[in-house]
Image: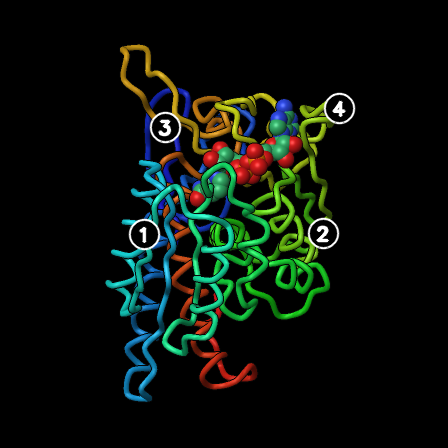
Amino acid sequence: MVESASQNLRGRITIATSQPIVFCKDIHLSAHIIDGRAAAERLRRRVAEHTAGLKPQGLIPGLAVVLVGEDPASQIYVGSKTRQATEAGIRHFDHRLPATTSTAELIALVRNLNANPEVHGILVQLPLPAGVDSAAVLATIDPEKDVDGFHAMNAGRLALGEPATVPCTPLGCLILIREVMSDMAGKRALVIGRSNIVGKPMAQLLLQNDCTVTIAHSKTRDLPALCAEAEILVAAVGRPRSIEGGWIRPGAVVIDVGINRIDDGSGKSKVVGDVDYATAVTRAGAITPVPGGVGPMTIACLLLNTVNAAIRQRLGTNAETLRI
Ligand code: NAD
């Protein structure tokens, strides 16, 4: 159930409901705040319960994490992933390599991990250092162990509507949309951004859920007009607060994928989304905050993908997996 906070023009009140708030003529309400931290915690708990149930069958899901170089942000991400994997009962195999590692060495490592039956998921932390052929490394990952869902085989399966491992961030977005909108059929959805890891798979997921999907990108004309139509808006742009609140259709479900570090005015940095939250929250029906929205879902979905990869590899492709 989503926590909701609502506000009228004269003061703050709080109500609890799982439905998007209806706008009245003289009372302007603000959006449900979709609590990504709570949703991620629920998903992690389900994954942990499922993993515990697999143990008596001798199956311990295994995740190999490959980190190349010293990028501080990547080190933090990898630390969070391995810690949360352990908490969910997933065994992790860490491979920390120097920035001088060659493409050939990485490909050799991935081939070894492909052949290791204790490893069910392989995560190569991006970005890889300049000079490494990232596409060649990712293409070497066995599609069944591709828990990031970046392999062309999984992207293709997703586009064809076949069973696929779905990239973690758009999968997390879909779960959050479902928290406030159980039936998406016929809804007008706008995805802003066309990257292979967020925008394109997000559009495919919305299409699978019977939305009428528009994809906007850096060459799109009149983005405000497209936003004004969108009942579901997913922003994955990488430009801080670039989606203005006034563009948003009243009552829309707004999912903000952006993670942008900006100066907070006092010399310190803070993280903001792609959506101008302060103005959007007064028009949207439901909105994810940044931080605390999509971000926590990404790792939770990685754990989900790892457990399901382990089930399929050990028990067969028709085995019952953990569904969202
Ligand atoms: P990207 O740079 O690969 O893609 C950005 C997309 O935005 C491009 O397709 C581009 O065409 C589009 N774009 C750029 N300027 C635009 C404009 N003016 N109007 C419309 N579209 C425009 O980025 P990405 O990897 O897809 O990530 C997007 C954002 O999401 C970033 O802030 C990133 O940090 C964040 N992100 C968050 C998570 C998470 O876990 N929450 C995961 C991945 C990415």
Q: Residue at x 32, y 39 (%)?
A: 70
Disc 3 secondary structure class: strand
Residue 96, disc: 1
> Mark 2 or mark 4, which has the lower sequence index?
2
> Mark 3 or mark 2, which has the lower sequence index?
2
Residue denoted by label 4: 221
Residue denoted by label 3: 271
Question: Quick one: quadrant of the N terminus?
Answer: bottom left
Q: CA distance from mark 4 to mark 1?
A: 44 Å
Nearer to us: label 2 or label 4: 4
Badges 2 and 4: C-beta atoms under 8 Å apart?
A: no
* Residue 205 shows in the view: yes
301 relative to 45 in the view: left or right? right
* Residue 16 shows in the view: no
Disc 2 secondary structure class: loop
Q: CA distance from mark 2 to mark 4?
A: 24 Å
> Mark 3 or mark 1, which has the lower sequence index?
1
Q: CA distance from mark 1 to mark 2?
A: 46 Å
Q: Residue at x 47, y 86 (%)?
A: 315
Number of residues whose C-alpha sits closer than 10 Å to that of mark 4, classed few (under 14), some (14–19) or many (20 or more): few
Nearer to us: label 1 or label 2: 1
Q: CA distance from mark 3 to mark 1?
A: 27 Å
| Residue 219 rendering spot, x and y as whole percentages | 73, 26
What's the residue type where badge 2 is placed? Gly
In the rendered image of this protein, does residue 267 appear above or below residue 228?
Answer: above
Residue 324, disc: none
Number of residues whose C-alpha sits closer than 10 Å to that of mark 1, classed few (under 14), some (14–19) or many (20 or more): few
Residue denoted by label 2: 186
Q: Which quadrant does ligand 1 occupy?
A: top right
What's the residue type where badge 4 is placed? Arg
Number of residues whose C-alpha sits closer than 10 Å to that of mark 2, classed few (under 14), some (14–19) or many (20 or more): few
